[in-house]
């Protein structure tokens, strides 16, 4: 079993760390708060800094919200990079910018350690159940070294290319998810304003070509006004902004992604950033009074 430094004990990180402890791995965790104290009770070792979490670890996993957060925990004061042993494997499972990912990998590899980017999809439910989709960028030998760890955390585990490609695939995933939620929201708003019962609408659509997991799960959230996350809207907006930044770097246009970001901006301006991303249905209604 491996010694793992685990950095990032948020909504996704906590259940992921718990699964690794229960699988028999030794975890060194940083920034333990009351809601993550139970991980220490289960056997994890609490340490003071990311560097201490990395020290002596075979593998270091980072699971934090955004690109600046990854940079801070890797290269800031007491950052994990200063504690990495030569030939340790750093796995960034956050969802961040592909360009920054390649820069961070180069810096880590210059110090003798190895690097994978392995963002995930599946939300808190997938993290708890070990059913995450994991999209991995990096060298094949590093992917195989990490595979036993990934198999504790996920079910659909795919090596998608060199370092940075995992983040690109995650961005593509977030475009599809975000725009499909917006699309379902538009369809539901149209039907509701035209007098159709949304429960009946969903039943009818689930029997046809429009059926999808997003229609099934997020459509039900829209019907029930059940918008506790799930996956917070502010985090999805962050991911789509990364998509737009990447598109600018590639000189391509993502017009519908840009439009969905504007709708998300409207929702965040009303204080809805902590709600589930299916709150886009409510945001559409807000800009269509009647």
Image (spheres, grey):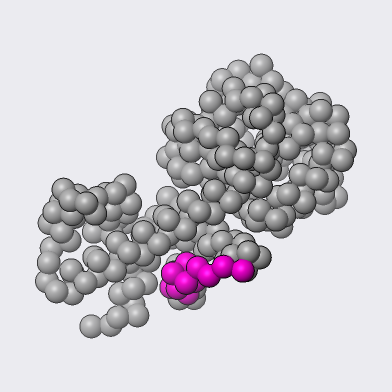
* Residue 57 pos. (x, y %): 77, 27
Residue 199 appears in which quarter of the rendering?
A: bottom left
Q: Is residue 176 above or below residue 252?
A: above
State the image quarter where residue 195 is shown: bottom left
Q: Quadrant of the C terminus?
A: bottom left
Provide the major secondary structure of the magenta segment. Answer: helix
Q: Position of residue 166 (x, y in %)?
A: 60, 44
Residue 13 lies, with reference to residue 39, above or below; the image says: below
Determine if the magenta segment contains residue 88.
no
Looking at the figure, which quarter contains the N terminus? top right
Q: Of 119 and 264, which appears nearest the observer?
A: 119
Q: Residue at x 66, y 53 (%)?
A: 98
Q: Residue furthest front?
A: 251
Where does residue 49 sit, x and y in percent of width and height? Answer: 79, 41
Q: Which residues are magenta?
A: 251-264
Does residue 239 appear in this view? yes
Q: Is residue 153 left or right of residue 224?
A: right
Residue 124 visible:
no
Q: Which residue is at 53% across, 62% downward?
A: 240
At x 49% / y 44%, what residue is drawn?
121
Q: Position of residue 288 (x, y in %)?
A: 30, 80
């Amino acid at each position: 079993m491996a010694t793992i430094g685990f950095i990032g004990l948020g909504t996704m990180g906590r259940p992921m760390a718990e699964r690794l402890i229960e699988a028999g791995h030794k975890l060194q965790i940083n920034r333990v708060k009351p809601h993550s104290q139970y991980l220490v009770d289960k056997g994890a070792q609490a340490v003071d800094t990311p560097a201490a979490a990395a020290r002596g670890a075979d593998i270091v996993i980072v699971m934090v919200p955004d690109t600046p957060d990854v940079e801070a925990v890797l290269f800031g004061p007491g950052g994990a990079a200063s504690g990495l042993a030569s030939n340790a494997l750093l796995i960034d499972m956050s969802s961040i910018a592909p360009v920054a990912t390649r820069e961070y990998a180069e810096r880590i590899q210059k110090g003798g350690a190895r690097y994978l980017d392995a963002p995930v999809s599946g939300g808190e439910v997938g993290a708890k159940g070990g059913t995450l989709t994991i999209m991995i960028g990096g060298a094949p030998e590093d992917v195989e070294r990490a595979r036993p760890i990934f198999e504790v955390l996920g079910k659909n585990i795919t090596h998608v290319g060199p370092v940075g490609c995992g983040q690109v695939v995650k961005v593509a995933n977030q475009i599809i998810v975000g725009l499909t939620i917006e699309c379902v929201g538009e369809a539901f708003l149209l039907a509701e304003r035209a007098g159709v019962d949304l429960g009946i609408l969903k039943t009818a659509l689930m029997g046809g070509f429009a059926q999808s997991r997003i229609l099934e799960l997020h459509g039900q959230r829209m019907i029930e006004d059940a918008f506790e996350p799930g996956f917070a809207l502010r985090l999805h907006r962050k991911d789509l902004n990364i998509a737009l930044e990447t598109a600018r770097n590639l000189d391509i246009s993502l017009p519908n992604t840009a439009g969905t970001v504007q709708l998300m901006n409207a929702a965040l301006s009303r204080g809805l950033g902590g709600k589930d991303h299916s709150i886009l249905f409510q945001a559409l209604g807000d800009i269509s009074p009647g």
